Amino acid sequence: MADTEYFVEYAKSGRSKCSAGKACNATIEKGELRLGVHFTTSAPMTKYRHWRCVTSRILENIGDPDDNLGGYETLTPEDKELVRKAFEDGFVAGGTEEEKDGAKAAAKLAADAERIRAKAAKEAEKEAAKAAKAEERAQAKAAKAAEKAQAKAEKAAKAAERKAAREAAAASKPAPATKRTRKQSAEQQGESAGEHEVDSAGRTRAAAAKRRRVGDAEE
């Protein structure tokens, strides 16, 4: 007799619990398809689990069901097909293990999606910060250029104001005398002096003549 024997059957009562551990510890209801594992250590012992809780590793340990799985011939045609397909596929379709693997796969996909989302968000945040910094630099550069242009315009305005003041001051001063104008002025002054001398001499001669006439009359 082998140390471990495997067999399938319908539960004779609802007293046994599934030995799948954390995966399932529920009661196996009467008439439900189950796998029995009979083994001997210090004493003979049999454990049961729902057929849906049979793992791929147990199927691998059983090996050839025709030689190593008892009770197969007592099953209904539908359950025979279910058991046969499980050994062909290497797992129980729709079973606890598949659900667990599916849940693990779904959790992994969700975790991967979350990592991708977090990475994308981080990259977007980084790009936004980079764009904001570039915009800040551009605004600072534009402000500096505007300030420089304003200072240049103010400087040009002050220079134009000083130039206008100089031109106005120059326009209010008399034109400097040239050699020609000085000569004309001297000639005019000479003519004026000559006229004054002639006039003075004429008046002197007239006065002398008048005095002579007065003297003659008195005689």
Image (cartoon, rainbow, N blue to C red):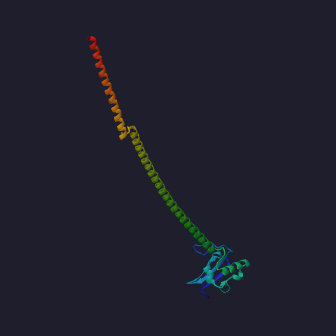
Query: Looking at the image, which is closer to me, 89 or 143?
Result: 143
Can you say whether 69 is above or below 122 in the image?
Answer: below
Query: Looking at the image, which is closer to me, 122 or 127?
Result: 127
Going by the picture, which residue comes out furthest to the top? 218
User: Which image quadrant: the C terminus?
Assistant: top left
Left-right relation of 39 to 171:
right
Q: Note whether residue 178 is visible.
A: no
Q: Note whether residue 77 is visible.
A: yes
Can you say whether 198 is above or below 146 in the image?
Answer: above
Residue 38 place in picture, x, y as percent: 61, 82
Q: How many marks?
A: 0
Residue 212 place in picture, x, y as percent: 28, 16
User: Which image quadrant: the N terminus?
Assistant: bottom right
Query: Looking at the image, which is closer to me, 44 or 63?
Result: 63
Query: Looking at the image, which is closer to me, 24 or 95?
Result: 95
Going by the picture, which residue comes out furthest to the bottom? 1
Left-right relation of 140 to 47:
left
Rendered image quadrant of residue 209: top left
Residue 65 place in picture, x, y as percent: 67, 84
Residue at 61%, 73% (x, y): give it: 101
Rendered image quadrant of residue 191: top left
Residue 169 place in picture, x, y as percent: 39, 40
